[in-house]
Image (cartoon, rainbow, N blue to C red):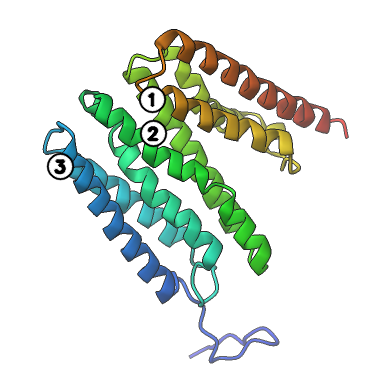
Amino acid sequence: MYIPSLPAGRGVGRIRRYGPPRRVVQDLVLAAIVSMVLCLAVYAVLPLPPTLPGVALLLVLAGVGVLAITAHNLPAAGLGAANRVTLGRAVLAIPVLALVPFPEALTDTGRWLVVTLAGLVLALDGVDGWVARRTGTASGFGARFDMELDALLLLGLSVLVWQAGQVGVWVLLIGGMRYGFVAAAWLLPWMRQPLPPSFRRKTACVVQGVVLVVIMAPVIPPGLASLAAALALAVLAGSFASDIRWLALGRTR
């Protein structure tokens, strides 16, 4: 039987790990349990159909599956403190996202629950990055995890604000603009260039989250909510326009 030789520097005893580290699996299982407990608590408080736990379970399984697949390159030590903070933010975001198919849940109590949970998610935004810098554990995985969570939360909040009658359907542009940008990049190769870090881009993201959470509160009148959302959308559109201009100029650089 022919056995191909191993490349220099690699021993036979070294086995490539294809699955996530055990510590990562433990973190994900715990996060899934806590997420379901929170969703069941929301289900007990609000007038919701019995299908909400099923929707929540699908969200949890999808999130755990994606993280398990993408976390196979993490060290055996596990997610690390910074990624655990982001995972905690995801746990708080899942009950908010689970309400999207159930607009009848957006009573005053339901809207205050959304404001509370989403506000906590936003309040912890930046903590994970700070922890990563303090512990020297910043990684591409952590940055992507944080970014995708923020984008998904903004999309969910946009839908909920519209369903609550605070703003017209155009508010979905706030949550959908980033996904439109990604779709355009599939069609236009010059838009796939990596963008440099930008404080302006981070600020625009924070503005969207804060505005959507605030205007979700029942005490905010629809007229004021529409004005605030329009200003936030203008900030976001300006930020994307700057990035697209930078990418377009990159074709000639």
Image location of residue 240, percent across then percent down: 66, 26
Question: What residue is shown at x 18% (from left), y 44% (from top)?
Answer: 53
Q: Is residue 181 above or below residue 69?
A: above
Q: CA distance from mark 3 to mark 1?
A: 21 Å
Question: Foreground mark, 3 or 1?
Answer: 1
Q: Answer with left or right where residue 185 lies relative to residue 124.
A: right
Image location of residue 149, percent across then percent down: 48, 44
Q: CA distance from mark 1 to mark 2?
A: 6 Å
Please tell me which residue lies in front, 90 or 214.
214
Q: Are marks 1 and 2 in contact (CB under 8 Å)?
A: yes
Judged from this view, the residue extending furthest toward the top is 223
Q: Residue 217, labelled with which disc? A: 1
Sequence-first disc among 1 and 2: 2
Residue located beneath label 2 in the image: 115
Amino acid type of the residue that numbered disc 2 sits on in the rendered structure: Val
- Residue 133 location, quadrant: bottom right
Q: Does residue 168 appear in the picture of this structure?
A: no
Question: What residue is shown at x 25% (from left), y 45% (from top)?
Answer: 56
Question: What residue is shown at x 49% (from left), y 27% (from top)?
Answer: 175
Residue located beneath label 3 in the image: 44
